[in-house]
Image (cartoon, grey):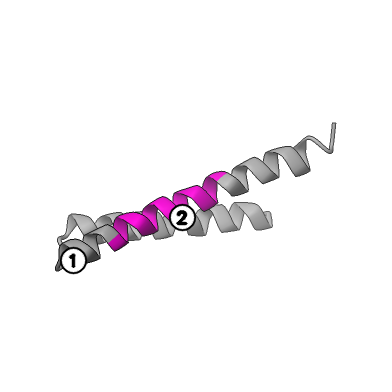
């Protein structure tokens, strides 16, 4: 498994873990809910950025 594949997998795991936590009602306040949603948004942003970098830096250099 490539480094970026492993990192992407960890991103997905963190997103799913946080979504499940929200689904089970583990956010005891609106502030905790907002923090969890912000975490999901941040990890998704990092995941998209990683995908973009890998696509443009690695795979396009092979052409």
Give yes or no for residue 44 being in the magenta stretch: yes
Secondary structure beneath disc 2? helix
Given contact means CB atoms under 8 Å apart, are the residues at marks 1 and 2 in contact? no
The answer to whether one can see residue 1 in this image is no
**Residue position marked by numbered label 1 in the rendering:** 26
- Left or right of 37? Residue 51 is right
- Furthest toward the top, the residue is 63
Q: Quadrant of residue 30?
A: bottom left
Q: Main secondary structure of the magenta part?
A: helix
Residue 36 - label: none
Whichever of labels 1 and 2 marks the residue nearer the N terminus, that label is 1
- In magenta, the rendered stretch is 35-48
**Residue position marked by numbered label 2 in the rendering:** 43
**What's the distance in space between the residues labelled 1 and 2, CA to CA?**
19 Å
**Up-down relation of residue 57 to residue 6 (above or below):** above
Q: Quadrant of residue 34?
A: bottom left
């Amino acid at each position: 498994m490539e480094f970026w594949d492993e990192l992407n997998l960890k991103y997905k795991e963190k997103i799913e873990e946080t979504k499940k936590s929200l689904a089970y009602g583990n956010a005891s306040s609106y502030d905790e809910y907002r923090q969890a949603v912000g975490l999901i948004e941040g990890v998704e942003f990092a995941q998209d950025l990683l995908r973009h970098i890998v696509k443009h830096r690695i795979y396009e250099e092979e052409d």
